[in-house]
């Protein structure tokens, strides 16, 4: 008694396409959410010293598959971060890193320090809360939607 299998190659090709398509769609959505996090953190960031808003960036900047030294596809991580080496125009010998941590951790609503004049003016022009914890608060807000968005992508495949 023999077994006859048909369509195995077709199923294999379909699974390979599904894998490739899923990775591409998920990666594209992760970048979109990283940029949303960056933009929201910039809205939350205070505006009194330096250009903290512009120091909030996404890396890597290039989208698409990454390769390692041997040319193989590598695991990709997307990071929203503060460029601590970015110069402060008002203080030539200082960088964003000289004050970003203190502002993030100690400025209202995360700490006792109050907003400066420029941050108060920024707050009056928007509904988002300007102040400390700006990057963390943005990440928390986006994270709540991220799982749902990724599940929707996988369901649509």
Image (cartoon, rainbow, N blue to C red):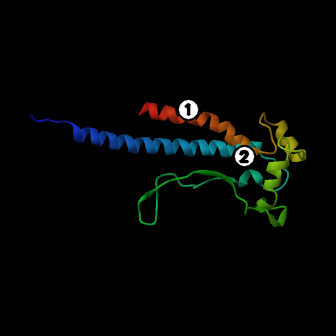
Q: How far from the left and from the top, in percent, is residue 125?
A: 81, 37
Residue in the picture at 77% in, 36% down? 128
Q: Residues within 10 Å of mark 1 (few under 14, many from 20)?
A: few
Looking at the rendered image, the quarter that the N terminus falls into is top left
From the image, tell me which residue sits under label 1: 148
Residue in the picture at 56% in, 35% down? 147
Q: Is residue 56 above or below residue 151?
A: below
Task: Place residue 84 in its image quadrant.
Answer: bottom right
- Proximity of marks 2 and 1: CB atoms separated by less than 8 Å: no
Q: How far from the left and from the top, in percent, is residue 105?
A: 81, 49
Label total for image: 2
Q: Is residue 128 above or below residue 20?
A: above
> Element under label 2?
helix
Q: Which mark is residue 135?
A: 2
Q: Is residue 110 above or below residue 65?
A: above
Q: On the rendered structure, is 108 left or right of 73?
A: right
> Element under label 1?
helix
Q: Nearer the viewer, residue 157 or 55?
A: 157
Q: How far from the left and from the top, in percent, is residue 4?
A: 14, 35
Rounded to the nearest angstrom, the CA distance separating label 2 from label 1 is 21 Å
Q: Residues within 10 Å of mark 2 (few under 14, many from 20)?
A: many
Task: Place residue 5 in its image quadrant.
Answer: top left
Task: Place residue 122 in its image quadrant.
Answer: top right
Residue in the picture at 81% in, 47% down? 46
């Amino acid at each position: 008694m023999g077994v006859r299998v048909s369509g195995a190659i077709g199923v294999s090709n379909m699974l390979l396409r599904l894998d490739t398509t899923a990775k591409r769609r998920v990666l594209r959505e992760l970048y979109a959410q990283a940029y949303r996090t960056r933009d929201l953190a910039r809205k939350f960031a205070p505006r009194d010293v330096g250009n903290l808003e512009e120091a909030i960036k996404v890396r890597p900047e290039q989208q698409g598959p990454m390769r390692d030294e041997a040319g193989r596809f590598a695991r990709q991580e997307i990071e929203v971060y503060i460029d601590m080496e970015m110069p402060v125009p008002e203080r030539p010998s200082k960088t964003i890193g000289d004050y970003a941590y203190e502002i993030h951790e100690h400025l209202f609503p995360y700490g006792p320090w109050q907003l400066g004049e420029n941050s108060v003016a920024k707050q009056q022009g928007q509904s988002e809360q300007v102040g400390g914890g700006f990057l963390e608060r943005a990440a928390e807000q986006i994270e709540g939607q991220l799982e749902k968005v990724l599940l929707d992508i996988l369901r649509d495949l």
